[in-house]
Image (spheres, rainbow, N blue to C red):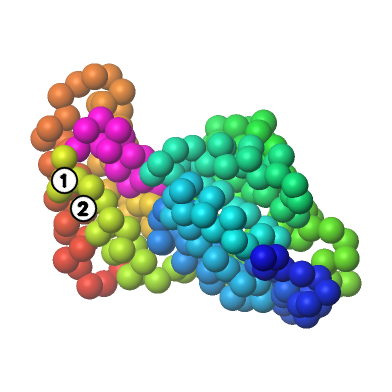
Amino acid sequence: MVDSDPLATPAATALRPLLGQTILVVEDSRYACDAIRLMCLHSGARIRRADCLRSARRHLQIYRPSVVIVDIGLPDGSGTDLIAELTHAVPRVSAILGLSGDDGACEAARQVGADGFLPKPLTSLAYFQKTILELLPEDRRPSGLHNVRDEPIRPDWLAYQDDMAHISDILAGPTDSRALDYAVQFLQGVARDAEDQILAEAAEQLAASRAKGAQVTAMAARVAGLVQNRLERQEAI
């Protein structure tokens, strides 16, 4: 099923430049995904979400979105694998973008065929719209763009708590090296995006210690405690 058919969907307008587009976001962080949800809402686009490679592939067997945004660090593998698959798929999605807070991820995404890249944290509505519109076919772009008042996008604090609950479950269970590496990578990204400096620094220190092969039991326990603290708080940072 084609989610975005230019013959069956309303044309984009200057005020809603992504009207008629369906964007599949492959992203495990609910906080990051909520930022994109708000941008899609302001832009007129529909959004679908997959939180892992497996879910994304299942979705793509049923629907074909017009735009796919793929986070590079996912719980069941690298987003570059999915980008490579989408690049060679027939028919091809109109626009494929990588997504990450890692500076080196942009080149990795482009090497496997990504058309563009969105750096985290995503805060600028104008940048989001411009990046996607430049990749779409000309017949799917509005004739002129409205001068967007580019106020920062602020995701819902509850989405951040959902992310903390997700990682708390992982840290509370059997934490092999792969699970711990994923949890640390996830926390580094989402805490940075949410400007949670204390948690971001603790996750970075844990990652650095693991890279050196040092004992990290106490450090991992501190990170788990910080995560639990965020779950118990009711106000945003």
Q: Amino acid at mark 2?
A: Asp
- In percent of width and height, residue 98 lies at 60, 45
User: What span is in magenta?
Assistant: 175-189
Q: Amino acid at mark 1?
A: Gly
Rendered residue at 13%/41% (across/down): 221
Label 2, on which residue? 169
Cα distance between the residues tagged 2 and 1: 6 Å
Q: What is the quadrant of the N terminus in the image?
A: bottom right
Quadrant in the picture for residue 176 = top left
Rendered residue at 26%/37% (across/down): 180
- In percent of width and height, residue 218 lies at 11, 35
Q: Is residue 101 visible?
A: no
Rendered residue at 16%/40% (across/down): 174
| Secondary structure under the numbered disc 2 in the rendered image | helix
Dominant secondary structure of the magenta stretch?
A: helix
Label 1, on which residue? 173
